[in-house]
Image (cartoon, coloured by chain):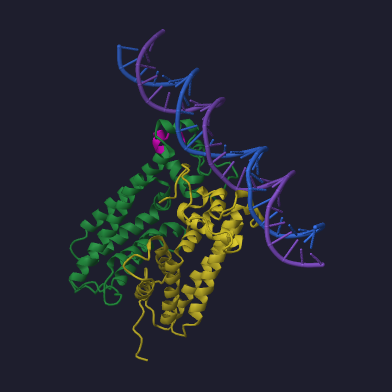
Chain colours: A green, B yellow, C purple, D blue
Amino acid sequence: MTRRKPAREEVEETPVVERESRAPVEAIRAAAFAQFAERGYPVVTVRDIMKACGLTQGALYNHFKSKDELLHDIITSTQSELERQCRQAVAGAGDDPRAKLAAFVRIYVMRHCRLRIEALVANREIGWLDGERVADIRRSRRAIRDILVSIFVDGVKRGVFEPPQVDGRNDLKAIAMALLDQCTHVSMWYGPGGDLTEEQMAKLYADMALRMVGAQPSRPA
Amino acid sequence: MTRRKPAREEVEETPVVERESRAPVEAIRAAAFAQFAERGYPVVTVRDIMKACGLTQGALYNHFKSKDELLHDIITSTQSELERQCRQAVAGAGDDPRAKLAAFVRIYVMRHCRLRIEALVANREIGWLDGERVADIRRSRRAIRDILVSIFVDGVKRGVFEPPQVDGRNDLKAIAMALLDQCTHVSMWYGPGGDLTEEQMAKLYADMALRMVGAQPSRPA
DNA sequence: GCAGCCCCTGAACAGTCATTCATATTGGCC
DNA sequence: GGCCAATATGAATGACTGTTCAGGGGCTGC
C-alpha cells in the first residue's frame, strides 16, 4: 500500500543495509526484493534501490546490465529454487499419489508463507520483463503445473483420486491451476502475526488439496 | 505480456473507438480498462488512453480529476457490482448452506471468466491507489470474504459442512481466503478458447468448493 | 611506492510523465 | 443569428526516469 505514485517521499523503509555486511550484489538483490514487493517494479527507481544499500545510482551498473536484468535475476533465482524444491519434495514422498500431492502442497505453501516477499515479487512483477526473459519463467511455471497434473493422472489411473468432472470428463489441468492459484496467493495475505503458523497453513492447504481431487482414504498400512 | 517498458511502440491495440458511439466518459473508461489490463497502470500514459478514444491528453481532465481518480472510478464500479452480485446470488439460493456456497462460487467464477479484463484490473492494480481510495475497495473485499465465512459458520453449525481442521480447530477465514484466491485468479489464465466454457468452469469450481469444506451429501429431497 | 584493477561517484543526456491553461470549437436554446 | 456552457486542443511546465561516463578512491601484490 505504500506502492506510491510520483510523489517522492523519502524512501528508506529498509533502513539502509550495512555496506560491509555482505557483497554489494547481495545487498542490491535484497533491497530490490524489498522495494519491488513494497511498491512495485515500475515505480521503484534505480536511485531508490541503491540508496537503500548506501550507494548511488551509477553503481548498479557495475553489477547488473540494467534494471531489467536485476529483476530477471531475482525472479529466476526464486523461481528455479521453487521448481527444484517441488521436484525434490515429490521425489522424496514415496509412491502413493496422495503422499506426493500432500508433500508438494506442504512445501509449496510453506515456502510461500516463509519467503512471502520473494514469492510476491516473482508472481506479481513478471509482466515487466521482456518477451525473451519472461519465457523461461513461464516455462518453469508450466513445468510445476505439469508435476501436479501427472500426480493427478497417476492417482486417477490407480483409483485413489476421484476428481470432480465436467460433463463426464476430467479436466486435470484446470484443477491444477485452481490449486496453484490458491497456494501461490497465500503470499499476498499471510502474515506471521495471523492465526495460523506456517506449518498449520501447510497442513490445512494439503488437506484441502486432497479433498479437491477426491482422494480416497488410505487402506490401513 | 505486452505490458512493456519505456520503449514506445505505437499503442493502438483497441483500434480507436468511434467518437460518436457513446458518451466520451464511457469510451475513456473502456479504453482505460483495456490498456491497464494489457500493460499495467503505471506504464499506461494519459496520452495512450486518450489516443485510444480519439482524443488528446488534455480532454481527460474534463471528465476525471486525475489519472488516479480514473483508476479508482473503474475499480470501484467493478468491485461494488461484484459485491452486489454475490449478495444477490446468496440471497436467492434458499436456506441450504450448500446451495448458498454453490451459488456464490458459480456467479463469482462466471463473472471472473466473462469480465476477465475488468476483474484483472480490479485485482491487480489496486496497489497504485492512495491510502484513502484503497480503503473502501479493501472493505468491500473483506465484506465478500465475510459472506463466505458466514455461510461456512452456518453450514458447520448445521452439520452439513465438515471443513478440514488444524489442531482440532476450524479456521474458516483461511479457507475462505483460499477459495477466493482460487476463484479470483481464473481471470489471469482463463480464455474463451480453452477446454472449458464459462458454465463448465463455474460448475467445476463449485464442486471443488463443496469438497473443500466437506459438504455432506444432501438428503434426498 | 607504484602499478593495476575493481568499484564508486555524481553530473550530464535524452527521454518520459501528469497536469495546466489560454485558445478554439461545438451543439443546444432563445 | 447569437449566446452560453460544455468540451477539445496542444503547447508549455516542472519534475522524474534509466543509463552513460569521465574522474577518482582505495585495495591488491609486488
Q: From which residue to which does the magenta span run?
A: A18-26
Looking at the rendered structure, the number of numbered marks drawn on it comes to 0
Q: Position of residue B142 (x, y in %)?
A: 52, 67
x, y (%) of residue A70?
40, 40
| Side of A95 relative to B213 (left or right) | left
Q: Say whether residue A151 is left or right of residue A185.
A: left
Residue A23 on the magenta segment: yes
The answer to whether B104 is drawn above or below residue D15 in the figure is: below
Residue at the extreme bottom: B221
| Quadrant in the picture for residue B181 | bottom left
Whole-percent x, y for residue B20 in the image: 59, 61
Residue at image location 47% in from the left, 63% down from the top = B119
Q: Main secondary structure of the magenta part?
A: loop
Q: Position of residue A114 (x, y in %)?
A: 39, 53
Question: B115 or B31, which is in the foreground?
Answer: B31
Can residue A150 be seen here? The reply is yes
Up-down relation of residue C16 to residue B164 (above or below): above
Q: Is A216 a magenta residue?
A: no
Q: Is residue A124 above or below residue B77?
A: above
Q: Quadrant of the C terminus of chain B?
A: bottom left
Q: Is residue A4 visible?
A: no
Residue A44 horizontal side relative to residue B63, left or right: left
In this view of the protein, which residue sits in the foreground, B171 or B92? B92
